[in-house]
Amino acid sequence: MSLKNSILIPPLLVDSDYEFYVDEPVFNPEIHLKLTEPDFVVLLDGFQHVSKAPQLSRPLSENRESQLAYTGPFQVLSDEGYDVLQSILKREMAYQISDARHPAKIRFGGYRSKWLQDFNRSPQVLEHLSRITGDVQLIPTTLQSSYSHTNIGYANTDRVDYFHRDSVPYVLILLASDMSETVGGELQLIERQPEEAFHLLEQYQGKLPKEYVRTIDYLGSNSCVFMQGSRIVHGVTGIESCAQPRITIVNSYMSADPFATECTRFDTFRKEKTGPLEFAMHKIWRSSAQMFDLASGKHSWPTLNQVIERLNKSIEELEQCRDLLMEKTSDRVGFYDAEKKQMGYIDAPPTSLKKGSN
């Protein structure tokens, strides 16, 4: 499964309000990566635990998304790469924000750090994660604000992140802190279809019996797990005590297949400055990639009617985007608000966290 055959990776955007860090090292995959394999993967079909996902030429599901639910822990960064990530993170901590779901998080690092851009777009990482799925070729999300999204958990908090399904298809979650002295802060997954998982959360008012919850054990700092986060409801428990904040770096990915069922959502990012343009670029990518598919060499040369049919499908992508931006339609997925004991949504812009507030 090689990126040579992939559709063009979406372009990078530039926001003049942000400046790149000038003293970063250049991302070097030979120095900064150490790609290892997870000991197991879990498939969506029955949540089977297997040693390795079956290697298929294409997804078998009708929605063209992967068979993969989630993996066991593994590693992508070398010690040198992790050190660079930590140095960037120290500066990024000045950009902490909060919203209805996250007590503390950092976003937009993909506009401030060239190293983070290259890490998220690394062909070596993309090929490695694609092989782990066994059936899907991955590219980075079109939502550049989500490059290396950072979740932060502090002591004496009732949550780090509520139970939710992601608004991007796939996520690589890297533990960027030492949790050896942490009580709480566990990544938990619900091995059910999302609709059933949210129904269970409402039924038990957020306090699920243990048989419904799978807790993920990392291998320690600089280890990671990979999951189809749009298909698995997951959250992070509160922290009773810790020697240092619990920090995870989340890289987001999507299928290179522009016909895969749409799992990138606008509503979650509607209130962010970059949200509308990033999502419009996402839909433009899908639309243009669907047209390009006609001349990709995979099919015989299209007839006039086939071109018109594909053009109409391509236009539908842009019409969907326009209607979402104008709030004529909604693609919200929400999260389970354990305090209010009901589904919640991000209906206000994030607010900056003041120094010393945690």
Image (cartoon, helix red, strand yellow):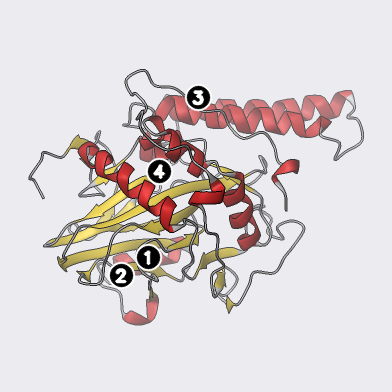
Q: What x and y, as percent, mark residue 53?
A: 64, 69
Task: Tell which tag, 1 or 4, sits nearer the viewer.
Answer: 4
Q: CA distance from mark 1 to mark 3?
A: 31 Å
Badges 2 and 1: C-beta atoms under 8 Å apart? yes
Q: Earlier in the sequence, mark 3 or mark 4?
A: 3
Q: CA distance from mark 2 to mark 3?
A: 36 Å
Q: Which residue is mark 3?
A: 322
Residue shown at the point (72%, 60%) measured from the top left: 60
Residue shown at the point (73%, 25%) measured from the top left: 311
Does residue 300 appear left or right of residue 75 in this picture? right
Q: What x and y, as percent, mark residue 56?
A: 74, 62
Residues packed near mark 4 inside 10 Å, few (<14), some (14 to 19) or many (20 plus): some
Residue shown at the point (18%, 65%) measured from the top left: 239
Q: Quick one: SS at disc 4?
A: loop
Residues packed near mark 1 inside 10 Å, few (<14), some (14 to 19) or many (20 plus): some
Residue shown at the point (71%, 33%) measured from the top left: 290
* Mark 1: amino acid: His
Which numbered disc covers residue 332?
A: 4
Q: Earlier in the sequence, mark 2 or mark 3?
A: 2
* Mark 4: amino acid: Arg
Which numbered disc covers residue 199?
A: 1
The front one of 171 and 176 is: 176
Badges 3 and 4: C-beta atoms under 8 Å apart? no
* Mark 2: amino acid: Gln
Q: Earlier in the sequence, mark 1 or mark 3?
A: 1
Q: CA distance from mark 3 to mark 4?
A: 15 Å
Which numbered disc covers residue 203?
A: 2
Does residue 220 appear left or right of residue 342 in this picture? right
* Mark 3: amino acid: Arg
Q: CA distance from mark 4 to mark 2?
A: 21 Å
